[in-house]
Image: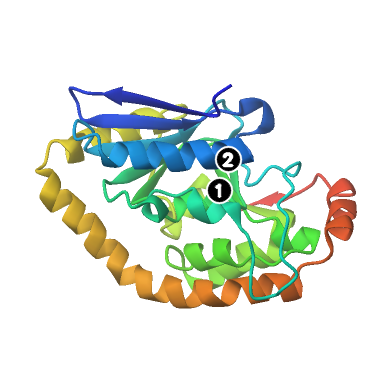
Amino acid sequence: MSTVRVEADKGGGVAVVTLDRPHRLNAIDMDMVRELSGAWRELRFDDTVRAVVLTGSGERAFCTGIDRDVVVPQPSSPYMQDDPLLTIGPKANGLWKPVVAAVRGMACGGAFYLLGECEFVVADPTAEFFDPHTTYGMVSAYESMLMAARMPYGEVARMALMGTAERLSARRAHEIGLVSEVTEAGGALAAAVRCASVIAEYPPEGVQGTVRALWAAREAACTQAFAQAPALIALGNLPAARQAELFAGRRGGFRLR
């Protein structure tokens, strides 16, 4: 069963990529990793598609990061980390067509690998953003590095360090620049498609060159930061069994700000 749906409006030049595991809050398993990478690579060669919208299936979540049931074997060296989420974004797969994210419900943890590689984010009023890593004894490395390019330092630090105790509302995410627009209830996908449709009408060479130029402004900093991430994760993460204990004993309450 497919975990990613791609629906293209050939005439309008827009494709909608949908994370489709609503029963797991669109958490990312290894099938989704492979399918997302394949979808971005296929869109590279489809000249009828000139802009892309990325969204999640269902009302509860855009994406809740990596599925806790996924086991990724790791080498013993702290200098090597096999992180499957590094391959799920459009830029990681060489796609320079603009991608607009439409977020409804929760977006947390590994979802930032995707949001960090989108051009901008449109949010439903129900959107909530948070990073649970520290709560469960894990280092927020790649996620925080990507968000540091989109949000003021203090806001990224607060989100990462407060873990599951706080969530950013769509309103607050808009105030700090993570979200470019908050729509009416249920309107995020339509608004994102409208934006993508406008962009798709423009000459693609200029659009894709602009996307590449914008990414170039962030690329050097990301590359240098990412080089440190494997060691930071290896040094700071608790053993998997202890993480599981913390996850099993998690508290349900949080503050929405």
Q: Earlier in the sequence, mark 1 or mark 2?
A: 2
Which colouring convention does the figure follow?
Answer: rainbow
Residue 219, image quadrant: bottom left
Which percent across, then down, holds residue 185? 47, 29
Which percent across, then down, holds residue 209? 17, 57
Q: Amino acid at mark 1?
A: Ala
Q: Amino acid at mark 2?
A: Cys
Q: Secondary structure at mark 2?
A: strand
Which percent across, then down, holds residue 137? 79, 64
Which residue does the image show at 60% across and 34% down from the upper left? 26
Of 4 and 174, which appears nearest the observer? 4
Q: Distance from label 1 to label 2 (Cα)?
A: 5 Å
Q: State if disc 2 and disc 1 touch (CB < 8 Å).
A: yes
Of 42 and 133, which appears nearest the observer? 42
Residue 63: which numbered mark, if any?
2
Residue 214, image quadrant: bottom left
Number of callouts: 2
User: In which quadrant is the N terminus drawn?
Assistant: top right
Depicted 133 relative to depicted 106: above or below: below
Which residue does the image show at 73% across and 55% down from the upper left? 73
Of 164 and 209, which appears nearest the observer? 209
Lateral position of residue 93 relative to residue 155, left or right: left
Q: Is residue 167 visible?
A: yes
Depicted 93 relative to depicted 61: above or below: below
Residue 111: which numbered mark, if any?
1
Which residue does the image show at 49% across and 62% down from the upper left? 147
How crowded pointer 1 is (Cα within 10 Å; few <14, some 14-19, many 20+) is rated as many
Depicted 19 relative to depicted 215: above or below: above
Which percent across, then down, holds residue 242? 89, 59
